[in-house]
Amino acid sequence: MQRKIRLLIVEDEEAIRTGLMDVFVYHGYDVDCAADGPVGLDKALSGRFDLVLLDVMLPGMDGFEICNRIRAQDRDQPVIMLTAKGTDEDIIQGLSLGADDYVAKPFSVAQLVLRVQAVLRRSGIGAELEATLRLGQDVEIDCRNLVGQRNNEALSFTRREVELLQYLQMNSQRPVPRDELLAKVWGYARNLDIETRTVDIHIAKLRRKIEPDPAQPRYLVTVRGAGYRLLAE
Ligand code: CA
């Protein structure tokens, strides 16, 4: 059995910190946390963590400084920065200090989980856990490289298509409504008719790639009045 992915959450707002802990524990991660800058820096520098989720505004030492010091010690430590500020300058500063990704608050938790998985994949951490998505006997998708095959026919995917499939897979026990997909996969705060069609267009494209008969979907099914559901078998 594979070891758990070790995640450090550095966040001073208790509600966000405990909320994130719950979500990542639920997703099978081994989670530790810190509520201020100095403790966060200490833990991050221990080198025990596969990924650090790092808030920017922290008591004692801000997230940019912590990221800077992590980088000075370990260039390859995956770091995702969280911030409420969300201005372009912050994004540029965060990325120039070497954060692997940047998520602006308020963020959707599902989107954050996908970003964490994406950064871990790019870092080659836990690759076996998430890299391959199989549908029935005939479809195999390499989520990291955005390629796949169906009956030995090569397929290619966009990042969004793979994130859509992964979100449906994470929630495969139920149909997922279009507006939830827009919120969690696309990050849209509200849905307009034109945006709902965006989901349908992506689903149609995916069906042409993965379904033996796109007109009679077997894997990516419509649940009338409820949304879309992924059936892996
Ligand atoms: Ca904060």
Image (cartoon, rainbow, N blue to C red):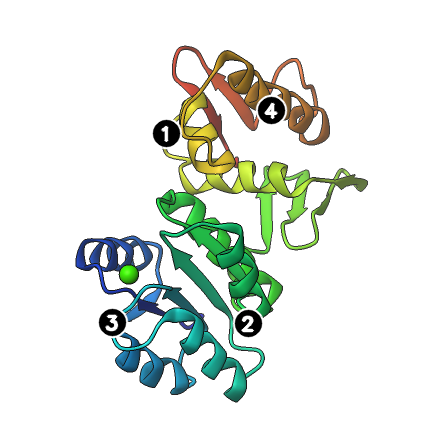
Disc 3 Cβ-to-ligand 1 distance below 8 Å:
no
Residue at the image position 63 percent from the left and 20 percent from the top: 201
Q: Mark 4 highlights which residue?
A: 203
The circle on residue 59 is 3
Front one among 70 and 186: 70
- Marks 4 and 3 in Cβ contact (< 8 Å): no
* Alpha-carbon span between mark 3 and mark 2: 19 Å
Mark 3 or mark 1: which comes first in sequence? 3
Disc 1 Cβ-to-ligand 1 distance below 8 Å:
no
- Relative vertical location of residue 87 with respect to residue 30 in this rendering, above or below: above
Residue at the image position 24 percent from the left and 54 percent from the top: 16
Q: Mark 2 highlights which residue?
A: 97
* Alpha-carbon span between mark 2 and mark 4: 37 Å
- Give the class, few, some or many, for how many residues have Cα within 10 Å of label 4's Cα (few <14, many ≥20): some
Q: How many marks?
A: 4
Amino acid on which the number 2 mark rests in the picture: Leu
Locate the N terminus by quadrant: bottom left
Amino acid on which the number 3 mark rests in the picture: Pro
- Marks 3 and 1 in Cβ contact (< 8 Å): no
Mark 3 or mark 2: which comes first in sequence? 3
Amino acid on which the number 4 mark rests in the picture: Ile
